[in-house]
C-alpha cells in the first residue's frame, strides 16, 4: 500500500511541476540539501518529470532545528565545557548533516522517570519533534494520530547499512513498530547475542571432583548436587552452592536466570509461545510442571541457596565473587562482570562457558529476549519527518566500522574523548544486532594473523588488552575467543511471540497474575506447596484473567 501511495503522490507532483514550469525550490536532492519548506522524502520535488536521486546523508542547508527529550544516568560523563545540550556529537550532527538538536527536557536516574515524564507530555500533546518511546507509548501515539507514518521515509531515505541492520531476524524490529501495515516506530536495535545465556561452570571444581563437563541438563543437575555436597573447593566446609538462582529463577533471561534449564525440558516461562491453537503462556503449560519438580529437587539436595527467594541479582552475583557458586547461566559477557571481580580475588579459579545443555530430547531451543525494546518516532506535523531516518543513517556512518566518517569519530574517541562515552550523546542510538558476532571475527583474525592493521579502534584496544594479560586481558580473551564465538552455534532460538502493547486485561490483572505465579512457583520449589497442585494453579490463573488475556493476545496476533 505504501508503494502505491508513493506512486500516486509522484504522479500528482509531476503534474504540479509541469504546470509550474519545473521551478526548483532549493538545492537538488543529489546535492544533499533540503531547505525548510521543501516537500520531504516521498514528496520530494521532481525535476523535468523524473524523481530526484535522494542522498541518505544529504546535509540540510541551512541547518534545521530538531527538538528531542533525553534520559540520562550515571554513565553520562562530559569533558570540561560540554554538556548534554552542547557536546561533540551534537556539534558533528550540525556540522556534517545540518541537524541541530535541541533538548526540550532531560531526566536522570532510571528509565521509569523518563517514561513517567514522557507520559505527561503525551497526555498534554506537548511533544518534541523526534523522541524515543516504549511499545505502550508507541501504540498510544499511533491510536491518537500523534506520530508520523514513517513508511515512505524509511523506504526512500534509509541507507543500505541501516536497512540491513533493521532487517535483522526478518525485520522483527520494524515489524514491532508497524501498525495496520504502516511503520511508525524505527527500532533502537541492540546486540542480539547478549540476550542468550550460556552455562558457566567452575572447571577447577570439576577437576577437584574428577567430574566431566555436563553434556545434558540431567548432568547439570548431577554436577550441581556434587558441587553442593562434595566440598569442591576443598576447605572442609559445606559452604558452596551447585547453581545460582534468584527470586525470579525461571521467569526472565540474563545473568542468573534458569530459563535455559527450563527450556531444556521444553518450558518457556514468562513467554508467549506457539501452541496447537494459537499463542499460549509458557508459565502455565504442562512442561512447566516437570521444571518445577527439578527446581524442587535442586532445592532439596542443597544445590540452591536456601534464601534464593529473597535474593536479587546483585546478591547472587556477590556469591559468585565470593567463590560460593559452581555454575550459573549468563550471557557471553559474564567475564566482564562478575567474573572479573572473582578472578581478582581468586586468580587460580577456572571457568568454562558451554552451550546450554539440552534435555532428554537432545534438542535445545534457547530462550532469548528481544533485541529492541524502544523505538524512535516523529511528531505528527513535523516539517521534516525524513530527518529521523537521516539522523540514524548519519549515526551508522559515523560510529560503525566501514562508515565514511568513522575514522574521524574513532580518533576523537581514542584521544580527546577517551575518558568519556560519547556514544551515549546521540539521541538516536542504535547498533547492529549482530555487532558482537562481527567483532568476534575481527578479533580472531587479528590474533591468528598477528596483524592489527584491519582492527577498529575498539578492536585494537581489545587486542592490546589480550596481549598485555592480567585480569583485563583474561576478561577480553575469555569473551572474544571462548564465550562469544559459542553463541553462533545456537541453531534455534525462542523469543516472546507477543511484542505488542499491554492488552486491556494485562493492564488490569497482569500484576496479580505475576504475583500468583511467582508465589506459587517459589512455594513449590521450597516444598511449602506440592508440585502436584500445579493444575490447580493453572486453573486459577485462567480464572482470574489468564483466559481473557490469552484471547486478547491471540486477537493481536491475528491482526498482525
Image: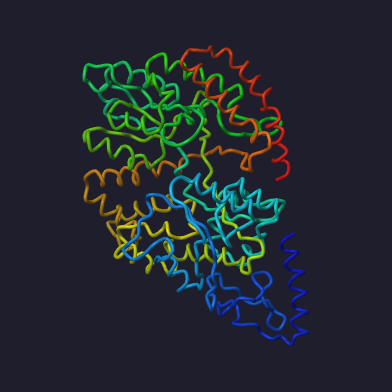
- The foreground one among 141 and 328 is 141
- Horizontal side, residue 35 vs residue 543: left or right: left
Q: How is the image coloured?
A: rainbow
- Horizontal side, residue 211 vs residue 47: left or right: left
* Image label count: 0
Q: Quadrant of residue 153?
A: bottom right
Q: Quadrant of the C terminus?
A: top right
Residue 44, above or below 341: below
- The foreground one among 43 and 467 is 43
Q: Position of residue 356 (x, y in %)?
A: 44, 32
Q: Quadrant of the N terminus?
A: bottom right
Residue 487, above or below 162: above
- The foreground one among 133 and 329 is 133
Residue at image point 50% right, 46% down? 113
Q: Position of residue 240 (x, y in %)?
A: 30, 21
Q: Position of residue 306 (x, y in %)?
A: 39, 18
Residue 61, above or below 197: below
Q: Position of residue 35 (x, y in %)?
A: 59, 78
- Horizontal side, residue 67 vs residue 23: left or right: left
Residue 415, above or below 333: below
Q: Quadrant of residue 308?
A: top left
Amino acid at each position: 500500500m505504501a508503494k502505491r501511495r508513493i506512486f500516486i503522490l509522484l504522479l500528482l507532483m509531476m503534474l504540479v511541476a509541469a504546470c509550474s514550469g519545473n521551478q526548483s525550490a532549493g538545492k537538488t536532492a543529489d546535492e544533499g540539501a533540503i531547505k525548510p519548506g521543501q516537500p520531504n522524502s516521498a514528496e520530494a520535488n521532481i525535476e523535468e518529470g523524473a524523481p530526484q536521486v535522494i542522498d541518505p546523508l544529504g546535509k540540510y542547508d541551512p541547518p534545521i532545528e530538531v527538538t528531542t527529550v533525553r534520559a540520562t544516568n550515571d554513565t553520562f560523563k562530559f569533558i570540561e565545557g560540554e554538556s548534554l545540550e552542547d557536546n561533540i556529537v551534537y556539534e558533528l550532527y550540525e556540522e556534517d548533516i545540518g541537524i541541530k538538536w535541541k533538548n526540550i527536557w532531560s531526566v536522570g536516574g532510571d528509565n521509569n522517570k523518563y517514561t513517567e515524564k514522557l507520559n505527561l507530555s503525551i497526555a498534554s500533546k506537548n511533544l518534541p519533534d523526534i523522541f524515543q518511546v516504549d511499545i505502550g507509548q508507541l501504540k498510544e501515539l499511533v491510536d491518537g494520530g500523534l506520530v508520523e507514518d514513517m513508511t515512505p521515509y524509511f523506504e526512500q531515505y534509509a541507507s543500505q547499512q541501516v536497512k540491513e541492520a533493521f532487517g535483522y531476524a526478518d525485520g522483527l524490529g520494524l515489524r514491532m513498530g508497524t501498525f495496520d501495515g504502516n511503520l511508525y516506530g524505527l527500532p533502537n536495535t541492540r546486540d542480539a547475542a547478549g540476550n542468550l545465556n550460556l552455562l558457566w561452570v567452575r572447571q577447577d571444581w570439576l577437576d577437584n571432583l574428577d567430574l566431566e563437563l555436563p553434556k545434558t541438563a540431567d548432568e547439570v543437575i548431577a554436577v550441581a548436587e556434587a558441587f553442593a555436597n562434595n566440598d569442591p573447593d576443598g576447605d572442609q566446609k559445606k559452604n558452596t552452592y551447585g547453581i545460582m538462582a534468584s527470586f525470579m529463577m525461571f521467569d526472565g533471561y540474563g545473568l542468573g536466570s534458569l530459563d535455559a534449564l527450563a527450556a531444556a525440558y521444553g518450558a518457556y516461562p514468562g513467554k508467549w509461545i506457539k501452541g496447537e491453537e494459537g499463542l499460549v503462556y509458557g508459565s502455565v503449560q504442562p512442561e512447566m510442571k516437570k521444571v518445577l519438580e527439578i527446581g524442587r529437587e535442586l532445592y532439596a539436595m542443597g544445590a540452591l541457596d536456601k534464601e534464593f527467594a529473597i535474593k536479587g541479582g546483585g546478591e547472587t552475583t556477590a556469591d559468585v565473587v565470593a567463590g560460593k557458586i559452581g555454575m550459573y547461566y549468563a550471557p557471553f559477557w559474564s567475564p566482564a562482570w562478575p567474573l572479573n571481580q572473582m578472578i581478582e580475588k581468586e586468580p587460580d579459579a577456572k571457568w568454562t562457558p558451554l552451550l546450554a545443555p539440552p534435555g532428554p530430547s537432545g534438542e535445545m531451543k534457547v530462550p532469548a529476549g528481544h533485541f529492541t525494546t524502544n523505538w524512535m518516532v516523529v511528531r505528527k506535523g513535523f516539517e521534516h519527518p525524513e530527518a529521523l531516518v537521516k539522523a540514524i543513517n548519519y549515526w551508522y556512518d559515523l560510529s560503525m566500522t566501514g562508515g565514511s566518517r568513522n575514522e574521524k569519530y574513532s580518533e576523537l574517541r581514542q584521544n580527546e574523548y577517551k575518558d568519556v562515552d560519547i556514544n551515549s550523546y546521540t539521541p538516536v542510538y542504535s547498533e547492529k544486532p549482530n555487532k558482537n558476532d562481527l567483532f568476534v571475527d575481527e578479533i580472531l583474525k587479528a590474533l591468528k594473523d598477528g596483524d592489527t592493521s584491519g582492527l577498529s579502534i575498539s578492536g585494537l584496544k581489545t587486542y592490546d588488552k589480550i596481549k598485555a594479560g592480567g585480569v583485563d586481558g583474561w576478561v577480553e580473551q575469555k569473551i572474544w575467543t571462548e564465550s562469544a564465538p559459542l553463541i553462533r552455534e545456537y541453531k534455534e532460538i525462542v523469543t516472546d511471540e507477543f511484542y505488542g502493547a499491554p492488552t486491556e486485561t494485562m493492564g488490569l490483572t497482569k500484576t496479580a497474575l505475576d504475583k500468583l505465579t511467582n508465589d506459587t512457583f517459589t512455594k513449590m520449589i521450597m516444598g511449602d506447596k506440592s508440585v502436584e497442585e500445579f493444575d490447580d494453579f493453572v486453573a486459577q490463573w485462567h480464572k482470574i484473567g489468564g483466559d481473557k488475556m490469552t484471547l486478547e493476545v491471540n486477537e493481536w496476533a491475528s491482526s498482525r
